[in-house]
Amino acid sequence: MEQNTPETLQEIRQTIVLNASIQKVWDAVATSEGIAVWFMPNDFKPIEGYEFHLNAGQFGMSPCKVTEIEPPNRLSFDWAQDWKITFQLVDLGEGQTEFTLIHAGWDANKVTEFGQPHTVVRERMGQGWVGIVKALSAYVEA
């Protein structure tokens, strides 16, 4: 029987400098209320190991699990069956924060639980994150 070896696709990575304090950005990315404003409705809690759901609209409730939390610099969670999301924050001083989003776990040989190939979804998500990060920027800089 032929073994299907993983063919890793490049992670999605976006970095932006926000005109907001690291604490304000942290509150936006590491609280249920904050995440709901710029990303998706959810029942997130900032506790390592906590299992929560993102309300992915037409795709339903998507299971997640907090895998790493280091306030106010880093939050990672597993999303759905294959993905890992990481938010990295760096205090640049003078009320500015560098925010990096990393969406990893892409494999050309896998399909999502909705039967869509990772190659197709990755392209869509790569574009989607641009708008989502802009929404975060608008929220924390308001």
Image: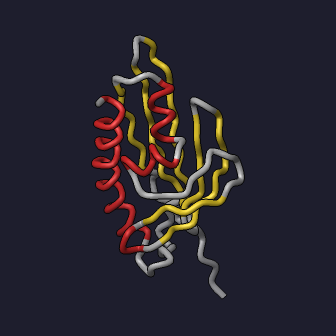
| Residue ID at (52%, 35%) | 88
Which quarter of the picture shows residue 98? top left
Q: How many marks?
A: 0
Q: Residue 38 at x, y = what percent?
A: 36, 47
Q: Is residue 51 above or below residue 117?
A: above
Name the colour scheme.
Answer: secondary structure
Of the pair 105 and 87, the residue shown nearer to us = 87
Q: Residue 45 at x, y = what percent?
A: 61, 49
Of the pair 14 and 43, the residue shown nearer to us = 43
Q: Residue 111 at x, y = what percent?
A: 48, 75
User: In the visual, does 84 lie left or right of 33?
Assistant: right
Residue lying farthest to the right in this orientation: 49
Residue lying farthest to the front in this orientation: 33
| Residue ID at (44%, 58%) | 41
| Residue ID at (59%, 57%) | 78
| Residue ID at (66%, 88%) | 1
Q: Is residue 123 above or below residue 97?
A: below
The quarter of the rendered structure image containing the C terminus is top left
Q: Is residue 98 above or below residue 55?
A: above
